[in-house]
Image (tube, grey):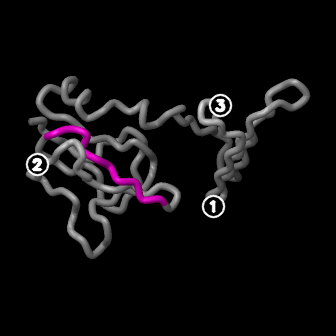
Amino acid sequence: MKKNAISEFELEKQDFKIKLKRGLLNGTASPATYDDASSAAPIQVPASPVAALPSAAASASAAGSEAEIKSPMIGTFYRSPSPESGPYVEVGTEVQPDTVVCIIEAMKVMNEIKAEMRGIITQAVAENSKPVEFGQPLFKIRPL
């Protein structure tokens, strides 16, 4: 919050509510509040989700011959730009680093996910229109 000059953040969804405030209250940091009717377990969120996620190229060197394109955020995975359209990529599609491979909807915002490396899609791992987690594999790719 300090790095991005955010002083207050609030998220509310169904029976879950989280509110974070940054600032001083009587010389001490003001506490974050957490309300949830079903669970009292806090959620761990990386400071910078995109920076914390290893790139597809880094995954390729670790795995050897195949890399993974991983989700940089939590949201709903979509293989195509609309229900009437075909998928962005299919198994066997050659992609470039700036090729859009899917979109992830997070808080009503459609985020285009790019391949980040040159290669051929070998497998679609995530299921269309289903939730995905941060760091979850979306596609497998063979680097070229």
Which residue is located at x 68 percent, y 49 percent? 10
Q: Which of the marked residues, 1 or 2, is nearer the chain's N terminus?
A: 1
Secondary structure of the residue carrying numbered label 2:
strand
| Residue holding disc 3 | 2
Q: Position of residue 12 (x, y in %)?
A: 65, 55
The crowding category of the residue bearing disc 1, from other C-alpha atoms within 10 Å (few below 14, some 14 to 19, many at least 20), is few
Q: Is residue 101 magenta?
A: no
| Residue holding disc 1 | 14
Q: CA distance from mark 3 to mark 2?
A: 41 Å
Q: Which of the marked residues, 3 or 2, is nearer the chain's N terminus?
A: 3
Front of the two marks 3 and 2: 3
Q: Position of residue 63 (x, y in %)?
A: 19, 27
The crowding category of the residue bearing disc 2, from other C-alpha atoms within 10 Å (few below 14, some 14 to 19, many at least 20), is some
Q: Which of the marked residues, 1 or 3, is nearer the chain's N terminus?
A: 3
Q: Quadrant of residue 26?
A: top right
Q: CA distance from mark 1 to mark 3?
A: 28 Å
Compared across the picture, whether 119 is left or right of 136 comes to left
Tell me the amino acid under the disc marked 1.
Gln
Tell me the amino acid under the disc marked 3.
Lys
| Residue holding disc 2 | 94
Which residue is located at x 11 percent, y 30 percent? 65
Q: Magenta segment, which residues? A: 109-118
Tell me the amino acid under the disc marked 2.
Glu
